Amino acid sequence: MILDWLSAALIAAGALLSVIGGIGLHRMPDFYCRLHAVGITDTLCSFLILGGLSFQAGLSLASVKLFLIFVFLLFTSPTASYSLSHSAWKWGLNPKGVEDHAPSAKIKVRE
Amino acid sequence: MTIFLYVIGFSILVTMALALARALAGPTVFDRILAVNMFGTKAVLLVAVVAFISGRTDVLDIALLYSLLNFVGVAAALRLVERGSFYATERVHVKTKPGEKL
Amino acid sequence: MKHYISLASLLMIVWLLLSGHYNPLMIGFGVISVALTLWLSFRMNIIDAESHPIHLSGNLVKYWFALAYKIFQANVDVVLRIVGVRPIEPQLIRIPFPEQDDLSKVIYANSVTLTPGSASIEIYPDSVLVHTLSKEGAQALIEGDIANIFPVTSGVKKEETQ
């Protein structure tokens, strides 16, 4: 019973995070900021939803499969995200709003 | 509990709709690929939730495969982008004349 | 040699968990496919301390728990910034790597990308270029937010290669 409520709370929090990430995809000013909004839905949201579902499944093969899905997402999402941002950088896309702030202006970034 | 999972599935569908809207509206091609990547991740979660709605946990294998396919798809799309242009459209541009049908 | 034994047991466990059938025929298929995979990776010569870092196992588990806490904090921060409670001030900074061997660089850059609010963009020989969502996040990364909990890898690796 308690486990049911706990898993329901985890899944609900994950769904809320996923909707917030979707809104963030539209509120952020440029591509590099949208990368962070997608980062939310890739890490904590998927972790909460898969964890809540595995609480419902209990100790079985289903929760092992959920754990494997989680591990795959954990290992592939930073690689996909890095290759996206790196190819955007190589293509010449400059981040917006960076020049106004002090610590970044002192560093020579493009070599 | 099933009603609750339906609500969760619906909110994941809303997120997928938002990602599709960004993929259609995105100013650069990288925005589109980012949105498609997020769409794939949400599809994996949706398949997992659907497996628990229907009570058939064998469906989880599909989610497992889809999470790998999604990553390979993003890497392949980026490979095409990094080479400068999409090969297919380039070839079509060379071969066709104005008014000619493919 | 111990890398191959570890890889074989790992692959066999994954096969048993994913198949769910425990009759001799399916387990036989599992043994055949594990043997084929091991033979292919032996021919390709890709199994070494870098691709299969078993010498890090204990350190890595501790590191993952510390990193999970950081990811949770960063998620709350980014959610507040999306909703509009805190401002969005993008920053570009270069951060030196805590260790200089390739495996540590990969783990560090991936950890930075995995934490929402900071994403690595470009890798230079001694540092990584990071795009962060806020001034506070950039300041925390410069002060060594992730580098402080980073596992000690290079010392163990030297022993491994001798």
Image (cartoon, rainbow, N blue to C red):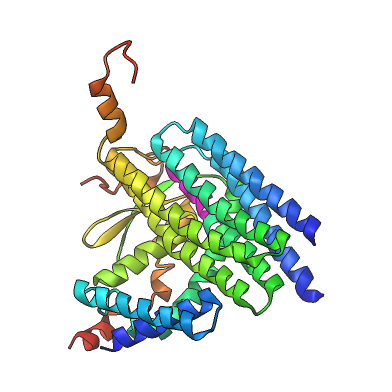
Q: Quadrant of the N terminus of chain B?
A: bottom right
The quarter of the displayed image where residue C155 is located: bottom left
Magenta stretch: helix, strand or loop mostly:
helix
Q: Residue at x 35, y 81 (%)?
A: C7
- Residue furthest to the top in view is B99
In this view of the protein, which residue sits in the foreground, A59 or C75? Answer: A59
Tell me: residue A36, above or below residue C16. above
- Residue furthest to the left in view is C162
A33 magenta-colored: yes
Question: Residue B60, image x and y in percent?
Answer: 59, 64
The quarter of the displayed image where residue A90 is located: top left
Residue C112 appears in view: yes
Q: Quadrant of the C terminus of chain B?
A: top left
Residue C85 appears in view: no
> Residue B26 vs residue A18: left or right?
left
Tell me: residue C8, above or below residue B52. below
Image label count: 0
Question: Residue C20, image x and y in percent?
Answer: 56, 77
Question: Residue A12, image x and y in percent?
Answer: 72, 58
> Residue C125 vs residue A83: left or right?
left
> Residue B58 vs residue C110: left or right?
right
In this view of the protein, which residue sits in the foreground, C38 or A79? Answer: C38
The residue segment tinted magenta is: A31-40
C47 magenta-colored: no
Question: Residue B19, image x and y in percent?
Answer: 55, 41
In this view of the protein, which residue sits in the foreground, B11 or C4? Answer: C4
Q: Residue at x 49, y 60 (%)?
A: B65
